[in-house]
Image (cartoon, rainbow, N blue to C red):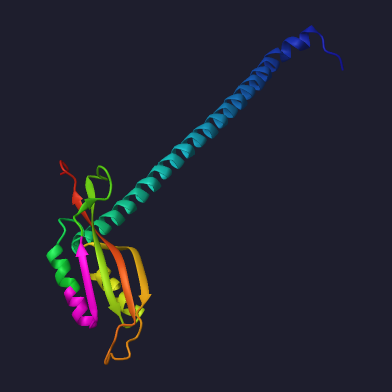
Amino acid sequence: MTFDRADFSRIQVSLLAAILMVAAGAALAWFADRQHVTSIRAEAAARAQLNEFEGKLKQVRSEESEIKQKAALFSNLRARGIIGEEQRLDWVELIKEIRDTRKLLDLQYEFSPQQSLEKGSAGGYAFKSSAMRLQMKLLHENDLLNFVNDLRSKAKAYVRVRSCNLTRIPRSTAASGETALLGADCELEWITILPAKGAT
């Protein structure tokens, strides 16, 4: 079968329509591909933004939790009397109460003047320390441990043991009743927290 000019003129319109349809199809395919690439980029950008928001939300929640913990700790310290002026009279009464309750044999102590623990302040607060020299005669070491634990749980201060030396006391053959077997010579720190000068 052969085509001549007359045949070509008859299919010219159909051929042109086919070429236009192929071109339109190619254009649509290119446009669809561009739209697909654009949507992938938009999805990636949205996911990155979502991840950023989730990271910020996690950080905010972490900071909120930390603030709640610090607020609880602050409330606990304030309730225990650790925040504020030192209460030496209360400390003396507490020591006497523990001595009487625990029936300790002999207890001598002396407080030094209050000093700052550090230069400046931390977060608007200044840490103060009062050293205490403590000398006790003990039946056994638990007397000392119980005394210190009672101080730590009841004192209106944070009580820290800086040093403690135990020595054995020679037994006296003439002594009767309960006699001390150990001597303790300790240094404790009573720490309180005060608002720094100028802090609100």
Looking at the image, can residue 156 be seen?
no
The image quarter containing residue 185 is bottom left
The image quarter containing residue 129 is bottom left
Query: Would you place residue 197 above or below residue 150 in this image?
Result: above
Q: Who's the residue at 15% across and 63% down the image?
A: 88
**Along the viewing direction, whichever of 27 and 133 lies nearer the viewer:** 133
**What is the x, y in percent for residue 155?**
21, 67
Quadrant, the C terminus: top left
**Along the viewing direction, whichever of 37 and 159 lies nearer the viewer:** 159
Q: Residue furthest top?
A: 5
Labels in figure, total: 0
Query: Would you place residue 124 above or below residue 137 in this image?
Result: above
Q: Is residue 184 left or right of residue 195?
A: right
Q: Who's the residue at 22% across and 72% down the image?
A: 108
Q: Is residue 108 magenta?
A: yes
Q: Residue furthest left?
A: 89
Q: Is residue 37 left or right of residue 71?
A: right
Q: Is residue 63 left or right of residue 158?
A: right
Which region shows up in magenta? Answer: 96-111
Quadrant, the N terminus: top right
**What is the x, y in percent for residue 117?**
27, 50
**Along the viewing direction, whichever of 25 and 157 lies nearer the viewer:** 157
Looking at the image, can residue 151 be seen?
yes
Q: Residue furthest front?
A: 174
Query: Would you place residue 192 above or below residue 13 in this image?
Result: below
Q: Who's the residue at 59% across and 25% down the image?
A: 28
